[in-house]
Amino acid sequence: MPETARSNSVWRTVGKLRRNHPAGWRATGWTLSAVFAAGVAALAGQQVQASWGRWAVGGYALAALVTWRWRHPAARATAAVAALLGAVIAPLIWLVTGGRDMPTTGMGALTVVKRAGRLLLETGSPYLPIEQLTGPESLNPYGPPLTVFGLPHALGLDGWAGNPRTWFGLSAILLGYAALRHLRADRPVLTLVAAFGSPVLALPFVLGGTDLPVLGLLVISVALLAHGRRTALAGAALGVACAMKVTALPVLLVIVPMLLVRHGRRPALVFTGSGLLAALAAGVATAPAMLTGPYDLIRNMILFPLRLTPQQTTAASPMPGQMVATGESGKLLMTIFLVIMMATVCVYLWRRPARDVATALLQVTAIWTLIFSLAPSTRYGYFIYPLLTLGLHRIVKAHHPAPSEPSTARAFIYDHA
């Protein structure tokens, strides 16, 4: 059997099992989540992660038990709420009560974003000058627009109101809900509760992950495109996401060829142009000093994650790229390899672009998996991106099936490639 046919057969079998046994499928998911949380509680080297695991395992175990044993229409919602309480609400309350004196190792992003907000108000730049760089946390690997989440604290707000974690989570929740409504997903509130109750989003929520607002913008951009309207707004959302973190760039590489295939030049130009304008405007608004000194941006956002600065990032996981990028030669080798790989991916996307949003999500998933596996600095947490796009692919495919015939714009791409 050809590889493509075998892959399609596997996916069809999985889809059939999910449709025919939805309760068993969800119960298996909550059971696996409980196993994961137990592993984090037992093996995590950071106290805040271990604390999350101890709280979350109870919530997931209860969610699995409810789903396995209770055959009632309310079982699905009850299980999702139990997971959310155990994996998000309880750990957050613990962090500001009994666990407030716990070491904050693993939540360095919150410190960086808070400092960025203060620096923006004082200097017009979210980055420290080179003479003040002393260690990994003195650099800021995030784009200027993420600084807005540190402004409440910089303006004097305390507690939850001044914590960037609060605004990371709220922005992701609001954008996610808007996206689900645009996609006409079934029971969007329940879907959102289950998504944030899952380990994919619960753990970064509790740890204060900066990826949440980026993912929220990516999801609303994809939803607007799948809905077939507001291409300019979709481009603007993606542009701001790319300006926040370069991890969002693969979505742009996939979507532009897809728009050319389905709709022609004008929508592709509108999408790209609005994205560039939004990214530029957001960058200038949150880092006006960068207009005269752009090297601080390059050092923090590009060179630091690639391990090309004297201060080495603490992002580390035993992935292939991390293991090769030891020593100056290893870092240079992996950087060159990544550049060549991305150039190859761009050529492939130009020659074989996605013909619909669902296929585009699968392409983005594959690209992110490659990048996070081969990057010189990486964390397991980065795989939240491909995991989320896989879930989003399921929703898009169910409610926005691919058009039966591709646009004649495909001929333009192939004739001019």
Image (tube, helix red, strand yellow):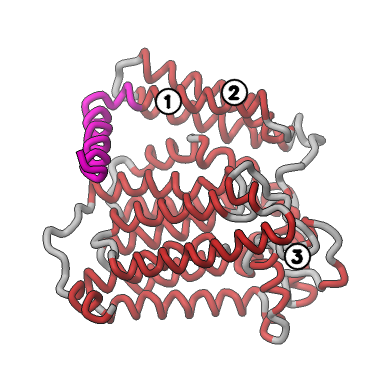
Above-or-below relation of 132 to 397: below
Label 1 or label 2, whichever lies nearer to me, is 2
Q: Which residue is mark 3?
A: 309
| Quadrant the C terminus occupies | bottom left
- Residue 21 shown in magenta: yes
Q: Quadrant of residue 311?
A: bottom right
Give the crowd class for mark 1: few <14, some 14-19, many >=20 residues within 10 Å.
many
Q: Secondary structure at mark 2?
A: helix
Label 2 or label 3, whichever lies nearer to me, is 3
Q: Residue 379, percent across and down?
A: 61, 46
Q: Which residue is mark 1?
A: 79
Q: Which residue is mark 2?
A: 38
Q: Which residues are magenta?
A: 1-25
Label 3 or label 1, whichever lies nearer to me, is 3
Residue visible at 19% across and 75% down? 409
- Specify the farthest residue to the bottom: 292
Q: CA distance from mark 1 to mark 2?
A: 18 Å
Q: Residue 301, percent across and down?
A: 65, 67
Between disc 3 and disc 1, whose residue precedes? 1
Between disc 1 and disc 2, whose residue precedes? 2
Main secondary structure along the magenta-highlighted residues: helix
Q: Secondary structure at mark 3?
A: loop
Residue visible at 77% across and 66% down? 118
Give the crowd class for mark 2: few <14, some 14-19, many >=20 residues within 10 Å.
many
Residue 230 appears anywhere in the view: no
| Quadrant the N terminus occupies | top left
Q: CA distance from mark 3 to mark 1?
A: 46 Å
Amino acid type at image mark 1: Ala
Amino acid type at image mark 3: Thr
Residue visible at 47% across and 50% down? 369
Q: CA distance from mark 2 to mark 3?
A: 37 Å
